[in-house]
Image: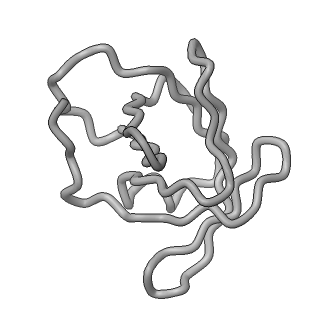
């Protein structure tokens, strides 16, 4: 699968409280995003790195994602979870 990183922000997962993810970027800016994952057994864990479109950092509503089942990444509303051994690609479904 092709990685899509333009306009995406690299964020480090520092803390998780239910669906609230406490994140930090490379410039030490901090964010709290409410993220829910559907139709997958995958989870975001502390020490994972996520890539998310910068426009999604500006909205203050829960974000819902499901697995992306295509090699085409044209949508700006993509979430990439980078784990030690793999990347997980999800697309926004609502929220």
Tell me residue 77's x, y (percent).
36, 39
Look at the image and tell me in which quarter the C terminus lies. Answer: top right
Q: Position of residue 87 (x, y in %)?
A: 37, 39
Left or right, 92 with reference to 19: left
Pick whichever, 22 or 81, lies toward us: 81
Q: Quadrant of residue 28?
A: bottom right
Quadrant into which the N terminus falls: top left
- Marks counted in the figure total 0
Q: Position of residue 81 (x, y in %)?
A: 46, 44
Residue at the location (36% across, 53% down)? Answer: 53
Q: Give the residue at x 40% y 28%.
A: 91
95 shown above or below 18: above
Q: How is the image coloured?
A: one colour
Say left or right for 2 vs 66: left
Residue shown at 31% from the left, 14% from the top: 69
Nearest the camera: 44 or 76? 44
Residue 46 occupies quadrant: bottom right
Left or right: residue 62 versus residue 64 is right
For residue 38, above or below residue 75: above
Which residue ends up furthest to the bottom in the rendered image?
27
Q: Position of residue 80 (x, y in %)?
A: 39, 43
Q: Residue lying at the far front in this picture: please name it.
A: 85
The answer to which image quadrant residue 16 occupies is bottom right
Q: Residue at x 69, y 46 (%)?
A: 34
């Amino acid at each position: 699968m092709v990685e899509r990183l333009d306009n995406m922000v690299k964020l480090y997962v520092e803390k998780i409280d239910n669906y609230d993810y406490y994140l930090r970027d490379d410039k030490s800016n901090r964010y709290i995003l409410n993220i829910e994952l559907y139709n997958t057994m995958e989870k975001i864990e502390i020490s994972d790195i996520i890539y998310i479109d910068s426009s999604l950092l500006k909205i203050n509503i829960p974000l819902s994602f499901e697995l992306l089942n295509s090699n085409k990444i044209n949508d700006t509303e993509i979430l990439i979870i980078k784990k030690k051994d793999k990347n997980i690609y999800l697309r926004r479904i609502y929220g």
